[in-house]
Image (cartoon, rainbow, N blue to C red):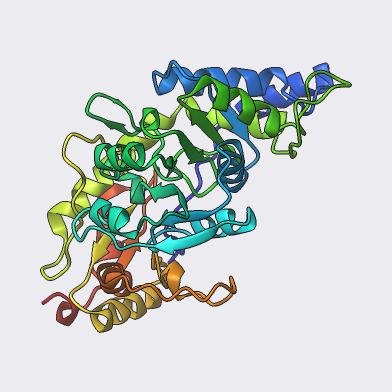
Amino acid sequence: MKKINVTEPYLPPFDEYVEHLRGIWDRNWLTNQGPLVNELEQKLQEYHRLSILVHSVANGSLGLQIALKALGVKGEVITTPFSYVATASCPIWEGCNLTFTDIEPDSLTINPAAVEAAITPQTEAILATHVFGNPCDVEALESIAANHGLALIFDAAHAFGVSYRGKSILEYGDVSMVSMHATKLMHSVEGGFIVAKDAAISEKMEWMRRFGHNGPEAFHGVGINAKMSEFHAAMGLCVLKRVNIIMQQRRLLTEAYDANLPDGVRRFHYRDEASRNYSYYPVIFESEQSLLVAVEALERKNVIPRRYFYPLLNQFDLMGTGFASACPVAKSVSERILCLPMSYAADIDSMMHAVLDPIPAQTCG
């Protein structure tokens, strides 16, 4: 049986991508804000119905680092332990100290009450993740940030196309970063983009991602190279053209999973008034042992799920900062949550049975 991975990158029609390549060859313009990058940024802005500018980056991690730098964040950052490692490694790379706070048991996003309780005179920013594309309690976090004079950055790596209360999730907070890595719903092989509500911060992020340039011989300040190439933008344009179809196919698979999910395995709660992009399908088992039995059974059938997010970020020693903050809700969820495979092109019924049928009955209550 063919291996079923937790995610399957979408590849557009080959000839369509090649047509973009011909244009790159004809223009001999490979990078440095070429026409395909400009076109992709414009279309991403239109897709999300944004009045604020989209700044493409070579990857989401660079986007987070630029966000921190543009906002002048140097001290303590409050964040979630239930996220991908880049959420923690990027601020550490920028010289920040992290404080981890617990998550909400239903939404799995950072708990605003825990955030407020963790604020100290050294706190400069909140870095919150829209986990699996599920929005944080953005209004509560905005209120806390405003009351305490903190920067608010959203790691929206999973949240392409998500809206909340009728507007793009990217319109909340000071800066948001969206990943366009090949594992994501919308991808450019490698890449991402950042947006800022404040025009001055947006302008600063723009020059920071291109070495600080202000024309060929002058500089606004110190920057880095975070530019997207024309080749990556070409893939992004091809995928964006079909992203709604991809999302619809994943919605159908999600509904099939929902209708057939075994007893004893539960979904988590998507925030009311939020749209879904169907990027991931996480389920929560009653115990870690039940999860491990299910993983073993699935892998025997060549089905490869993923333990997102395990272990927690505050359990890593590799960063050398000795994180020890207790986050009991996040710890419990991390030990019991599993992302099942999602695909844009699968036969829905066959995929559903291939993934759900191997899960032993004893793991389900």
Pick the residue in front: 353 or 271. 271
Return the x and y of residue 151 as percentages of the image width and height.
45, 40
What is the quadrant of residue 140 in the picture? top left
Return the x and y of residue 90 as percentages of the image width and height.
58, 54
Pick the residue in front: 130 or 7. 130
Pick the residue in front: 59 or 250. 59
Q: Is residue 290 above or below residue 223?
A: below
Pick the residue in front: 77 or 135. 77
Q: Quadrant of the C terminus?
A: bottom left
Give the residue furthest to the right.
Answer: 217
Q: Residue at x 42, y 31 (%)?
A: 243
Would you say residue 109 is visible in this rendering?
no
Q: Residue at x 25, y 48 (%)?
A: 254
Q: Is residue 6 above or below residue 41?
A: below
Return the x and y of residue 86 as percentages of the image width and height.
54, 56
Return the x and y of residue 355 as percentages of the image width and height.
30, 63
Marks counted in the figure total: 0
Q: Residue at x 60, y 46 (%)?
A: 65
